């Protein structure tokens, strides 16, 4: 009996994983704060607001990767808080970004004149439900309006 329920659970998981899931929709960033400041790197925290268009809820265990603005490396990001992602609802990701201070100094001299920047993020996220999690690649590149990004 026990093996039957395990097989049934795996079968349901396999069927549900075959359905195409839509990517969450990015809304905006807020709550930007400078944490520890250093000469080589500084820690910044902010909240990224998203909308989950899927009929399924999920859980984000962790995420990490690298970030670039206008093809210049800005630093390493990570999310080390478990985030419950509700179905058909908004959710918030608390991001920590270790900013490379060399980039910030160079960008502050020339980059803040631009209203639009190209943001690129590459990394991985651990997402799942129940006891079943898998690593999903994160690869985003797009133009962002700085005023709208930090409203």
Image (cartoon, rainbow, N blue to C red):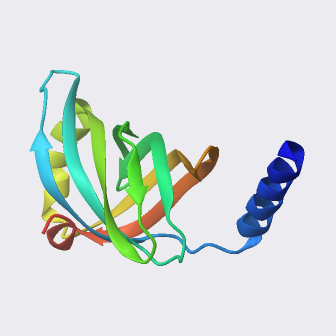
User: In the displayed structure, would residue 87 be above or below residue 66?
Assistant: below
Please identify the quadrant where the C terminus is shown: bottom left
> Which residue lies most toward the front here?
1
Image height of 8 relative to 35, above or below: below
Q: Where's residue 2, x and y in %?
A: 83, 44
Q: Is residue 109 visible?
A: no
Q: Is residue 136 left or right of residue 71?
A: right
- Provide residue 138's location: percent of width, then percent of height: 54, 53
Residue at image point 46% right, 72% down: 87
Q: Could you tell me residue 20's position as x and y percent? A: 68, 75
Name the residue located 65 percent from the left edge and 46 percent from the top edge: 134
Above or below — where is 35 with respect to 111? Answer: above
Q: Nearer the viewer, residue 142 or 90?
A: 90
Q: Is residue 56 left or right of residue 9?
A: left
Is residue 69 left or right of 105 when viewed as pictured? right
Q: Nearer the viewer, residue 113 or 34?
A: 34
Percent position of residue 105, x then y: 16, 38
**Can residue 147 be seen in this snapshot?**
yes
Residue at the location (13% across, 33% down)? 35
Q: Residue at x 81, y 52 (%)?
A: 5
Task: Tell me how many marks there are.
Answer: 0
């Amino acid at each position: 009996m026990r093996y039957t329920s395990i097989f049934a659970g795996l079968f349901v998981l396999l069927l549900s994983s075959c359905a195409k899931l839509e990517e969450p929709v990015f809304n905006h960033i807020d709550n930007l704060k400078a944490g520890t400041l250093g000469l080589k790197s500084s820690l910044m925290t902010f909240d990224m607001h998203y909308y989950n268009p899927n009929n399924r809820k999920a859980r984000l265990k962790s995420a990490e990767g690298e970030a670039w603005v206008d093809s210049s490396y800005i630093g390493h990001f990570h999310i080390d808080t478990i985030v419950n992602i509700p179905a058909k609802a908004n959710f918030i990701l608390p991001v920590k970004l270790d900013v490379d201070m060399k980039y910030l100094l160079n960008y502050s001299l020339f980059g803040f004149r631009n209203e639009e920047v190209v943001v690129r993020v590459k990394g991985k996220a651990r997402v799942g439900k129940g006891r079943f999690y898998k690593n999903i690649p994160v690869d985003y590149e797009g133009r962002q309006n700085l005023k709208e990004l930090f409203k």
